[in-house]
Amino acid sequence: MSTAGKVIKCKAAVLWELKKPFSIEEVEVAPPKAHEVRIKMVATGICRSDDHVVNGFLVTRLPVILGHEAAGIVESVGEGVTTVRPGDKVIPLFVPQCGKCNICKHPEANLFMRLSYTLLFTCRGKPIRHFLGTSTFSQYTVVDEMSVAKIHADSPLEKVCLIGCGFSTGYGSAVKVAKVTQGSTCAVFGLGGVGLSVIMGCKAAGAARIIAVDINKDKFARAKQVGATECINPQDYEKPIEEVLREVSGGGVDFSFEVIGRLDTMMSALLCCQEAYGVSIIVGVPPNAQNISMNPMLLLTGRTWKGAVFGGFKSKESVPKLVTDFMAKKFPLDQLITHVLPFEKINEGFDLLRSGKSVRTILTF
Ligand code: PAD
Ligand code: ZN
């Protein structure tokens, strides 16, 4: 029996309070309104940005259904939807692309944020908030048409879900935002799913040296597998990590990436790049409302300091291409996946991330 046009009752992981486990609840998911799409989730990754909400680093209203790195199948569409149909395989887009605003029209930009999302979920009679317009920790979700991309009908959803955030963010930060050059030296701070994808991007761009930096040495083997040429643990040195990196690179790296989300490592990443031409990219999401104080001389000498979300990709047009590239074996995703768990074990998945034991855990529905 078709569910189109009806409220769907399904399971979702609700975050009622900060710093508390998710609670698997029955929620009601409204049918899609005009220009909206209801998706049956198949797989979702756990990204550190979701955990940043749980610990209060990233502020959003509660109660909320988190999750933004996923893949699924369109269940039904609202009036006026033209780019996807029921049965299509899709990836929700946490950075929407409307194609009409100044940001979407700019050749290099991708950030388009809607100010408000309609309330689409209810649980125990209470409205539950959407997260980033995606809310993928639910068996069904509703997204705006500009927040969903149709992908290849044969794509393996339990892998390409990573193209919805971690992979694209890291890879694009190297090839699109930094524009890493052939023969260059790169330093990547943080070897989670996003950092490893930065390494893949640096490698694809032809970097000669890729120095991987992490305080968890268990991450080093995998970093080497995806392309790191050296791995450094800052805790093995007395002097600051930026000095170590300047020394081993003969004066500073060409490109550095902060893929952790800490102010001190953002500063170290800036300081380790070459003072006259180094480029440093902020990928990690910093703790809410905290500032860095810096000496402008660091930039006056010639460094470039920039940042981007989602690897600078325009989401709706780039995601289908990235999926086809994956299927043409232009890059791997398997090396990013350490665990696969049923959706109901979401709290176990977050514990694995917090304990440093996982890179990406994929939850399957
Ligand atoms: P992760 O937690 O899997 O990886 C972070 C890594 O950093 C871990 O391996 C840690 O051991 C390591 N680390 C922690 N502290 C330090 C330190 N002081 N020095 C060196 N290494 C350290 O996270 P992730 O890969 O899922 O995400 C990384 C960041 O990127 C995080 O802040 C997340 O919120 C952000 C992000 N940004 C975007 C975007 O669009 N810009 C998208 C997705 C994720
Ligand atoms: Zn993410």
Image (cartoon, helix red, strand yellow):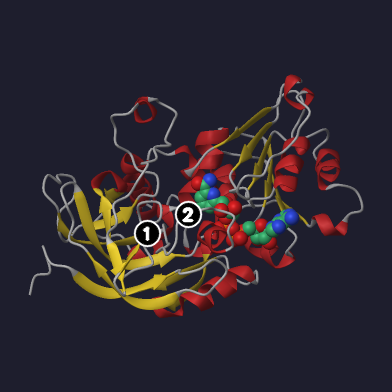
Q: Is residue 349 above or below residue 209?
A: below
Q: Which mark is residue 349?
A: none
Foreground residue, 30 or 274? 30
Element marked by disc 2: loop
Q: Quadrant of ligand 1?
A: bottom right
Residue 300, image quadrant: top right
Question: Number of labelled discs?
Answer: 2
In the image, taking residue 99 as reference, residue 77 lies left or right, namely: left
Reading the image, the residue beneath label 2 is 60
- Residue 195 visible here: no
Q: Is residue 51 left or right of residue 14?
A: right
Query: Does residue 46 appear in the picture of this structure?
Result: yes
Residue 188: image x %, image y %? 67, 47
- Any mark on residue 129, and which? 1
**365 on left or right of 210:** left
In this rendering, position of residue 36 left or right of residue 303: left
Residues at marks 2 and 1 touching, judged by CB atoms closer than 8 Å: yes
* CA neighbours of label 2 inside 10 A, class few (<14), some (14 to 19), many (20+): some
Residue at 15% across / 46% down in the picture?
81
Name the amino acid type tagged 2. Thr
